[in-house]
Image: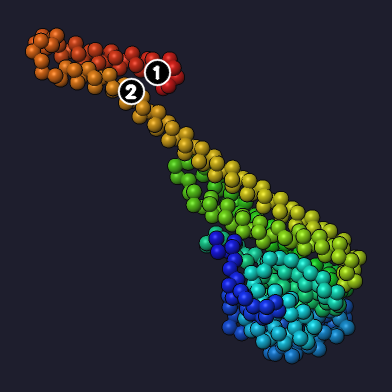
Amino acid sequence: MARLIKKSSKKVGLHPGVLIHVGEKKLEKPRIRVIDYSDSQFEDKGLQTIDESFPYRDTPGVSWINIDGLHDVELIEKFGKHFNVHPLVLEDILNTEKRPLMEDYGDYIYIVIKMLYYEEKENIIKAEQISIILCKNLVITFQEGGGDVFEPIRERIRNSKGRLRGTGSDYLAYSLVDSIVDNYFIILEKFSDTLESLEEMLMEDITQYDLNELHTLKREMLFLRKSVWPVREIVGNLERSGSPLINQTTIIYLRDLYDHTVQVIDTIETVREMTTGMLEIYLSSMSNRMNEVMKVLTIMASIFIPLTFIAGVYGMNFDNMPELHSKFGYPMVVGLMILVAIIMIIFFKKRNWL
């Protein structure tokens, strides 16, 4: 529940633009890495200080500056002042509980998106916030931790494969968002496999069914939906923004990315509906099973009620009771009880109660 309902008590009472890190400290020290490339040159190196990244603002090629670790508020503030980033954007970068969004500030476009990972041991989804600033010939990314899904993009730039080396910063930003969305498909495949196995268990033996795992799957789908649903709006706004930072050639790819986000959302909704349906089947099956048990117990009680009555009557010690002193009294009473039981069983059979 803590992942679905975030608390931001640190920011209560503060005026807009105050820079406070909201979230976990995932790295001891921020790491800065820059990739600068064009058709004819490539450079990939780590930087020791934020000042070393400032010259890449005006390079003729495309520069990608990546900052891992957001707990150093002074570093983020210094970075924002040099690159003329609005204080509200810096505030959102430091708030790792921000809802995914896209905002156009004219000179740059700001994007917040959730990068998701599937933790197999715990069978849960873990999220990391990625902030992307798209400028002319420059893309800046801010990450909470050190791991990401961007290594294939770095490899394509390094080996000059695909369109990246011959396109602008807008295509790089598109590639980053596309890589994150593609990773959503991988997570959905894993949960689809889990759903199939749960469905097989449900059909085979409901008594051995793990309801906790089904509830976990339903909760994770809710978390996934909360993280992915705004991405469709982000991509749609990028496609329709009309910003000079986005070339017409990139808009075609954004349309394709929009289709991918719609497909992801449709798949999430399908899995959620199937999970809800399986939960209803489980509850209905358990209810029917309980009804069958109660039905058997009720029939047994109904059969023994008249037998108990007969046994109770002949258990009374009155002198003038019929057949009390007859040597055939006991067999007659037992026979009467058996006959009553048989008649009731036949009656229940005809009513299809048995």
Q: Looking at the image, is 51 positioned above or below residue 17? A: below
Residue visible at 13% across and 11% down? 321
| Other-residue count near label 2 (Cα within 10 Å), few / some / many at <14 / 14–19 / ≥20 | some
Identify the image quadrant of the N terminus: bottom right
| Other-residue count near label 1 (Cα within 10 Å), few / some / many at <14 / 14–19 / ≥20 | some
Q: Is residue 22 visible?
A: no
Q: Is residue 227 visible?
A: yes
Q: In which quarter of the image is residue 24?
A: bottom right
Residue 257 on image: x %, y %: 79, 60
Identify the image quadrant of the C terminus: top left
Q: Looking at the image, is 72 positioned above or below residue 343? A: below
The amino acid sitting under disc 1 is: Phe
Q: In this view, does 346 lie to the left or right of 8?
A: left
Depth check: give the residue in front, 193 or 104.
Answer: 104
Q: Name the residue under label 1.
A: 348
Residue 227 on image: x %, y %: 67, 61
Is the Cβ of the residue at disc 2 closer than 8 Å to that at disc 1?
yes
Residue visible at 88% across and 83% down? 60
